[in-house]
Image (tube, rainbow, N blue to C red):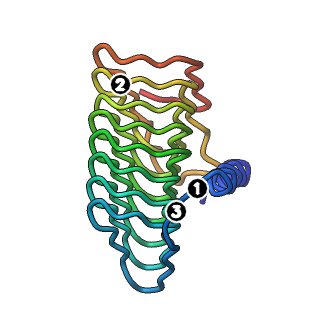
């Protein structure tokens, strides 16, 4: 489990992201099912439990939230915010996220030209940027971070200290900043990293 401080900060960021998201389509809510937004479609907020969310190439949606599912955003798509617990997030080439991207137990992958206006954060998953942009910084507790070639991060990088005691060898997050990548802001490591 994440530290209470980390969990509270994560929840607060998600609440702010939700308040900032704007959309023009109707909202979709499901339990035990996936949500698909087709190419070129406009949707509102997308929420599901035990299902994945897929926003196809060129589609638009408000915020997308799921528990026990992945979120995939296609190339040139536009969304408000992305949040999952127990799932990964993949943002396609040249897609735009108007606020934040966050996951608790899952990886975040931003493809070439993807643009996240706010923060990208995970507790127990890796973050990987491939020539992507993040405007509000990166944050993790347990995950590796790869800021690939030609990526740009504004707002720095924070690696939080885990709250639980480890009965064995702790994983040290591996931080990689690739060629021509830029991290504008503080690199703050509250635990040992590689």
Q: Is residue 164 visible?
A: no
In the picture, measured across the screen, residue 85 lies left or right of residue 35, that is: right
In the picture, measured across the screen, residue 9 lies left or right of residue 105, that is: right
Dot label at residue 24? 3
Q: Real-space Cα distance between discs 1 and 3?
A: 7 Å
Q: Nearer the viewer, residue 165 or 92?
A: 92
Identify the residue under disc 1. Answer: 22
How many marks on residues?
3
Are discs 1 and 3 less than 8 Å apart at CB? yes
For marks 2 and 1, the one nearer the N-term is 1
Dot label at residue 151? 2
| Residue reaching furthest to the front | 24
Q: Real-space Cα distance between discs 3 and 2?
A: 31 Å
Quadrant location of the N terminus? bottom right
Residue 95 on image: x %, y %: 35, 44
| Residue reaching furthest to the bottom | 32
Q: Nearer the viewer, residue 90 or 141?
A: 90
Disc 2 crowd, CA 10 A, few/some/many (<14, 14-19, 20+): many
Judging from the image, what secondary structure is the residue with disc 3 in?
Answer: loop
Are discs 3 and 2 less than 8 Å apart at CB? no
Disc 1 crowd, CA 10 A, few/some/many (<14, 14-19, 20+): some
In the picture, measured across the screen, residue 12 lies left or right of residue 168, that is: right
Residue 179 on image: x %, y %: 28, 15
Judging from the image, what secondary structure is the residue with disc 2 in?
Answer: loop
Dot label at residue 94? none
Q: Is residue 182 visible?
A: yes
Quadrant in the picture for residue 42: bottom left
Q: Nearer the viewer, residue 134 or 106?
A: 134
């Amino acid at each position: 489990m994440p530290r209470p401080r980390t969990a509270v900060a994560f929840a607060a960021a998600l609440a702010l992201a939700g308040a900032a998201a704007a959309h023009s389509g109707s909202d979709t809510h499901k339990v035990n099912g996936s949500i698909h937004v087709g190419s070129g479609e406009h949707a509102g907020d997308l929420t599901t439990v035990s299902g994945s969310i897929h926003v196809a190439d060129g589609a638009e949606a408000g915020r997308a939230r799921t528990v026990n599912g992945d979120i995939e955003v296609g190339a040139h798509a536009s969304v408000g915010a992305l949040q999952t617990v127990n799932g990964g997030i993949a943002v396609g080439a040249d897609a735009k996220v108007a606020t934040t991207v966050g996951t608790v137990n899952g990886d975040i992958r931003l493809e070439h030209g993807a643009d996240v206006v706010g923060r990208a954060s995970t507790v127990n998953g890796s973050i990987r940027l491939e020539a992507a942009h993040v405007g509000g910084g990166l944050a993790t507790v347990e995950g590796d971070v790869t800021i690939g070639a030609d990526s740009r991060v504004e707002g720095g990088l924070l690696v939080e200290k885990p709250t639980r005691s480890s009965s064995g060898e702790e994983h040290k997050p591996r931080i990689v900043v690739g060629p021509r990548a830029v991290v504008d802001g503080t690199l703050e490591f509250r635990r040992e990293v590689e």
